[in-house]
């Protein structure tokens, strides 16, 4: 889970970041990926920039170019002001390295679907 503030309208952004990595020797504990995503999100930014910043930070810390980040988040910009939409789900993706290959990309998104199905059954 991530929480951020939209740097354009100064409204809350709440969602989930999914991270994929193909290690190049250095791996982190699972909680460290969550900490990185939450740390970057605290800065307040646009979701597209947030997705890229998380991926870049993980690449830097793990020394691999094989990183994917997918964020699905609701935006207060749309729910609290303007159109007053009940759900303003926005999805962004950054794919680096091997995640640009069709089969690896498909596996990443298939795993996201499995995680979402699992979380709905709990």
Image: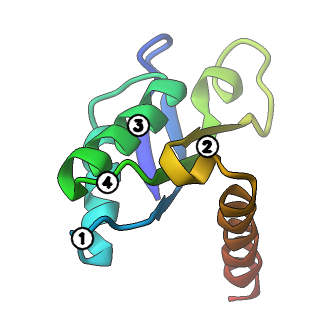
Q: Earlier in the sequence, mark 1 or mark 2?
A: 1
| Residue of label 4 | 64
User: What residue lies at 30% left-to-right and 51% top-to-bottom?
Assistant: 58
The number of numbered badges drawn on the structure is 4
Q: Which mark is residue 25?
A: 1
| SS at mark 4 in the image | loop
Tell me: residue 120, above or below residue 66: below
| Residue of label 2 | 73
Foreground mark, 4 or 2, reads 4
- Location of residue 65 in the rendering, given as x and y in whole percent from the top left corner: 38, 48
User: What residue lies at 66% left-to-right and 76% top-to-bottom?
Assistant: 115
| SS at mark 1 in the image | loop
Q: Which mark is residue 4?
A: 3
- Cβ atoms under marks 2 and 3 closer than 8 Å: yes
Q: Residues within 10 Å of mark 2 (few under 14, many from 20)?
A: many
Q: Is residue 91 left or right of residue 10?
A: right
**Distance Cα–Cα, label 1 vs label 2:** 31 Å
User: What residue lies at 71% left-to-right and 84% top-to-bottom?
Assistant: 118
Q: Earlier in the sequence, mark 4 or mark 1?
A: 1
**Distance Cα–Cα, label 2 vs label 3:** 10 Å
């Amino acid at each position: 889970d991530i929480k951020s503030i939209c740097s354009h309208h100064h409204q809350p952004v709440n969602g989930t970041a999914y991270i994929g990595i193909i290690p190049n020797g250095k791996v982190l504990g699972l909680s460290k990926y969550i900490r990185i995503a939450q740390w970057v999100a605290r800065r307040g930014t646009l979701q597209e920039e947030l997705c890229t910043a998380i991926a870049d930070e993980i690449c830097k810390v793990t020394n691999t170019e094989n990183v994917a980040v997918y964020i699905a988040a609701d935006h207060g910009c749309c729910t609290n002001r303007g159109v007053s939409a009940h759900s303003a789900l926005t999805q962004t993706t950054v794919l680096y390295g091997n995640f640009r290959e069709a089969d690896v990309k498909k596996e990443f998104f298939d795993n996201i679907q499995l995680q979402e199905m699992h979380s709905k059954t709990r």
